[in-house]
Amino acid sequence: MQSIEVEITTGREAVVHDLSDAAQKFLADCGATDGLLHVWVPHATAGLAVIETGAGSDDDLLSAIDDLLPRDDRWRHQHGTPGHGRDHVVPGFLPPYATLPVLDGRPALGTWQSICLVDTNVDNPVRKVRFSYLSG
């Protein structure tokens, strides 16, 4: 298995950050052919999604999170910015991992799919993401 950890600057606003180019670069650097790509976010307040980006779906996802998990004072887990407790619930809905097939050195994504880091935690502007490749 080959594995690296990269830092992603997400900033101080909720974001859907496309990791697809970084994943492809990692696979190319590995000389990947066929196998599995595992993506892991070692944080208690971020998750991963495989979705379309750039056509509004990423903003729709953030809006849906806000609707489902409002940033208010209902959360028992309270530290950081107001409503931060909800950020700790996000990985229950958007897991911090994804595993994708790799075919001919590329993630086997659909036409409009991207691998995305979803970070609603405005208290931590830098995240780590681990890419691991297991040859088939």
Image (tube, grey):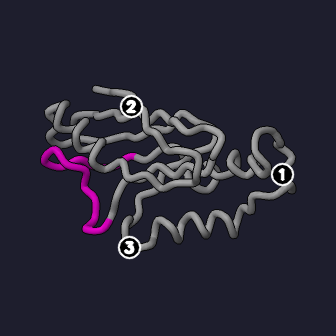
Q: Amino acid at mark 1?
A: Trp
As rendered, which of 36 and 118 lies closer to the eye? Answer: 118
Of callouts 2 and 1, the N-terminal one: 2
Residue carrying label 1: 75
The residues tagged by marks 1 and 3 sit, at their Cα atoms, a distance apart of 32 Å
Please provide percent x and percent y for residue 24: 23, 44
Disc 3, SS: loop
User: Is 90 positioned to the left or the right of 134 in the image?
Assistant: right
- Viewed as shown, does residue 119 lie left or right of 31? right
Q: Looking at the picture, how far across and down is residue 3, in whole percent?
A: 33, 27
Task: Specify which label sits upstream in the sequence, 3 or 2.
Answer: 2
Is residue 5 depicted above or below 94 in this figure? above
- Give the residue type at disc 2: Val
Callouts 2 and 1 close, C-beta under 8 Å = no
Q: Which residues are magenta?
A: 99-112
42 part of magenta stretch = no
* Residue type, numbered disc 3: Ala
Mark 1 or 3, closer to the camera: 3
Residue wearing tag 3: 55
Residue 87 disc label: none
Q: CA distance from mark 3 to mark 2?
A: 26 Å
Q: What is the CA distance from the residue labelled 2 to the residue labelled 1?
A: 31 Å
Q: Residue at x 38, y 65 (%)?
A: 53
Q: Is residue 76 above or below residue 4?
A: below
- Residue 85, position as x, y percentages in the image: 76, 47
* Residue in the foreground of this view, choosing between 27 and 16: 16
Which of the pair 61/49 is nearer the observer? 61
